[in-house]
Image: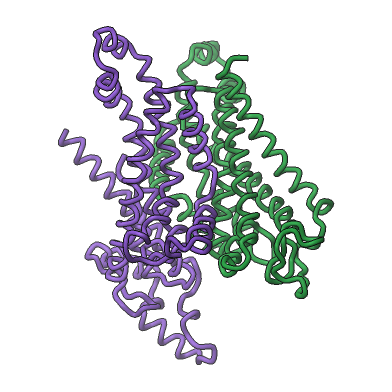
Amino acid sequence: MSGAALRRNGLGGLGLTLAVLALLAALAAPVLAPHDPVKGDFSQGLKPPGTPGHPLGTDQLGRDTLSRVLYGARVALFIGLCTVLLTAIVGGILGLLAGFFGGWPGQALMRLCDVQLSFPFVLLALTINAIVGLGLRNIIISLAAAGWVVYARVVRGEVLSVKQRDYVQAAAALGTGRGRILFRHVLPNVAPSIIIVASLQFSQFIVAEAAISFLGFGVQPPTPAWGSMLSESRDFLYIAWWLAAFPGAALALTALGVNLVGDWLRDVLDPKFRV
Amino acid sequence: MRAYLVSRLAQTALVVFLSLTAVFFLVRLAGDPVLLFLPMDIQAKDVNEFRQRLGFNDQLPVQYARFVLGAVRGDFGESLRYRRDALRLVLERLPATLELGVTALLLTFFLAIPVGIVSATRRGSLFDYVGMGAAVLGQAIPGFWLGLMLIYFFSVRLGWLPTGGIGGPAHFVMPCVVLASFCAARIARLTRSSVLDTLNEEYVLTARAKGLAEWIVIGKHTAKNSAIPIVTLAGLETGQLLGGAVITETIFAWPGLGRLTVQALQNRDSPSCSPPSSSSRSPTR
């Protein structure tokens, strides 16, 4: 294999490994976690890593860090997956319709997207979350409401360019119904872009959720989430560095893995699609 | 050219107006601020009087009209928490955020662009691998975790840098690094791919064939042409930096707009939310 191909696939392989590890942690948390992530044991408070029974240490309430990190993976990946699905479906459909049928509704949608895209993503998701309230379901809604615009823009652009292609125009000339053209010709060509954007946004959603939980919104304690764990760790940074190090490392590695997989997918599916 | 500028300005005005509207409704919807500010044993009639005095009892269109007319004049009302003019409150915090943002931007450009250029020209070398590896990490590592780890190493363990707040140059170091990391990573990668693209162009081959020194070839010919996507991204990133400072300012207790917005959101302080949200628009594309 050439050096470039090896590097491209090597990085993708690394990303896949990290992502799979995160997935395993999330799925197998009840089996892998040595302790209950929510119930604390005050006599075991603030123990450093390496204490027997607590390989990654404990927090101020005596809750095992390893267990909480593993369960945190569940929350993070669940939120990421749900948000990506929601935004891809909503944004994708809107983009498809706007691009394919055009007209003033399409234009209006694009102007709306422009307005929303001018808000910084995290700030917008934070504001929406402050409105709709706390909790798991609401953070998914907030992130999706802030994130669907990217899909709409990208998909509409792709649809506009696919519409011009010869086989689409030929199909239209043959009298094929518009619905059939949309589903059989346009959608399969737009699908790679949707997948690429989805994979790139997945890690962005996970990190944004952690950031929002860090600020006190989003997922609430005692549900173990990496963001709120990092927020709680701030008070104990001087004496218990492991409370910040391990959840953050888990978050960083998961985000890294998903990013690398996304980059690899982009290289494979459409190298022209740069960040 | 003038027609283009005018049309862009008009679009900007429209975007700002729509943003103000969005902010108005978002913050009003965030819950009843009146109840949060009054003591628990308040009488019902006092609640009503308070609400009346602050103008929350009026019809929504009336409130909206008052808000828009006030915003145009620069009057965003009084902050509920601080009992001071909201706009002045924001303007007091704005310089701190701007200082941080501008320094982070400068750091980004002086670090990311050279790294990107050198990585492109020395493609496949150790520098390339290390540089792009750092860029990938910079994009993936969440800013707030990086901030916490930096605080731990440089403030708690080594004691070299202060943990937060505003002050001399030492206070700038960690917040700027954290703020710049994501941005610099993206720009470094984009610079590298953009320069790689332009290096394949024919005019570069011509310049080399002419016998021009390498640094002229790169500095003069490729630089300007590869700059186009970088400038586009830089414009977008500037807007994002102002908004993304929310997390950094919270970690480092930086007295800026981001922290004010978060505190206002946490306290349902509606007049204070409006100016900062409206000010972090990204520049017109």
- Point 62% across, 44% down: residue: A253
Residue A202 in the image: x percent, y percent?
59, 42
- Point 26% across, 12% down: residue: B207
Q: Residue furthest left?
A: B2
Could you tell me which quadrant the N terminus of chain A lies in? top right
- Point 73% across, 53% down: residue: A70
Q: Between residues B2 and A274, which one lies in front from this camera angle?
A: A274
Residue B25 can be seen, yes or no:
no
Q: How is the image coloured?
A: by chain
Q: Between residues A124 and A104, which one lies in front from this camera angle?
A: A124
Q: Which chain is painted in green?
A: A
The quadrant where residue B237 appears: top left
Q: Between residues A268 and B78, which one lies in front from this camera angle?
A: A268
State left or right for residue A263 relative to residue B249.
right
State left or right for residue B133 relative to residue B89.
right
State left or right for residue B73 relative to residue A216.
left
Using the image, determine if residue B51 lies above or below residue A104. Answer: below
Residue A123 in the image: x percent, y percent?
45, 55
The tint chain B carries is: purple
Residue B146 in the image: x percent, y percent?
52, 52
